[in-house]
Amino acid sequence: MNIHISDLIRHLESQAPLHYAESFDNVGLLTGNPNWVVTGILVTLDTLEEVVDEAIAKKCNVIVSFHPIIFSGLKSLTGKTYVERAVIKAIQNNIAIYALHTALDNQKWGVSGKMGNVLGIENHSVLIPQKQTIKKLTTYVPQAYAEQVRKALFKAGAGYIGNYSECSFNSSGIGTYLPNEFANPSIGEIGKLQEESETQIGVYFEKHLESKVLKALFESHPYEEVAYEVITLDNTHQNIGMGIVGTLASAVSESVFMQLLMQKFGLNNIRHSKFINKPIQKVAVLGGSGSFALKSAIAAGADAYVSADFKYHEFYGAENQILIADIGHFESEQFTKILILEFIQKKFTTFAVRISETNTNPVFNYH
């Protein structure tokens, strides 16, 4: 059976919905046609021209990239930049490029979660929960149909609150409506005021499910015109947001912790803030550029914060409260390719899924 790019996209977005990508980001299908049949997938951190060459050589017509090669708008395609050259070659060779980036960053199990697993961090939670990720649906249903509608909403993914499912609030009341001459009422008569015993149903759902939840509502509801409202809540989602924070199995000294980082991430050096003679057990991590989350790591009570791309003056922000370990952007995200490979392979086994062997790290160290 042929697998189309659209099938792959549905699976990727079931794991890392694009609704949770940051507003500045450019995620999703960047080149290619969703109707193409997949011949092979190459997984990479960055889509450079060399990576496209590798995809061609390995007969992969889809590149699943963590970083988007097209980040800001392209005004021309003449091959004058590395971005344009990669995009031109992909288009010329009918290769689709799909980028995940912050849609994956904002999953608890994603980039930072993988970092935490490598370090042996236990009992971790999201460091900076993303706001406005949860919505609430309120609707009004004839009492005889309330159970039918609830079941349809639950099946569509509504009603989850943390570790609980099929959650709803229900109250009873009297609904009124007067059908005009153009109406086709399932209950009541044209020109006659109808009083109906109704159940008000309220359910929460993740924002990326809105179209699916509303479709289930309209298909299961008996009324010709469905009364409902959807609002965005201030509640945060326990599994959506940037970074993670958790604990090591036992406390270690700062020097032992640095050695652990060197070993687990294959590092030759680490930029860090000064040691403050504090045991390290509670650790926050965030893949990629993470200086913006330093205050959150301190507020979470972390003893150490592992991320990348700290500027000179930002190390002062440790304020003798936390150990900052800047392990490098590429190095912090190096396990992301494995993460992406694993969740593609769980679903698709009929074509090759390969990890790119091209080293896309633009930063080198002279030893």
Image (cartoon, rainbow, N blue to C red):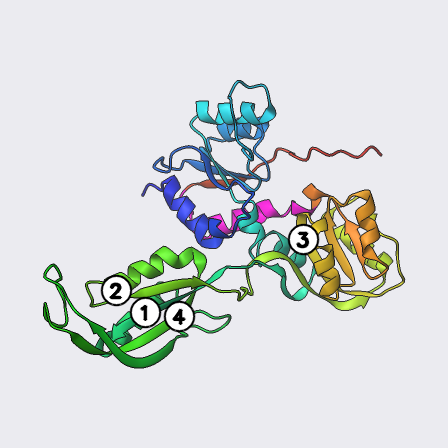
Front residue of 59/206: it is 206
Quadrant (top left, top right, bottom left, bottom right) of the N terminus:
top left
Q: Amino acid at mark 2?
A: Val
* Residue stretch in magenta: 332-350
For disc 1, the neighbor class at 10 Å (few under 14, some 14 to 19, many from 20) is some
Name the element at disc 3.
Answer: strand
Q: Which residue is identified by label 2? A: 226
Residue 265 shows in this picture? yes
Which disc number belongs to residue 203?
Answer: 4
Residue 270 shows in this picture? no
Q: Amino acid at mark 3?
A: Leu
Q: Which residue is identified by label 3? A: 286
Q: Amino acid at mark 4?
A: Val
Q: Is residue 348 magenta?
A: yes
Name the element at disc 4.
Answer: strand
Residue 46 location in percent, x, y?
Answer: 59, 36
Q: Nearer the viewer, mark 3 or mark 2?
A: 2
Residue drawn at x 24%, y 75% is: 175
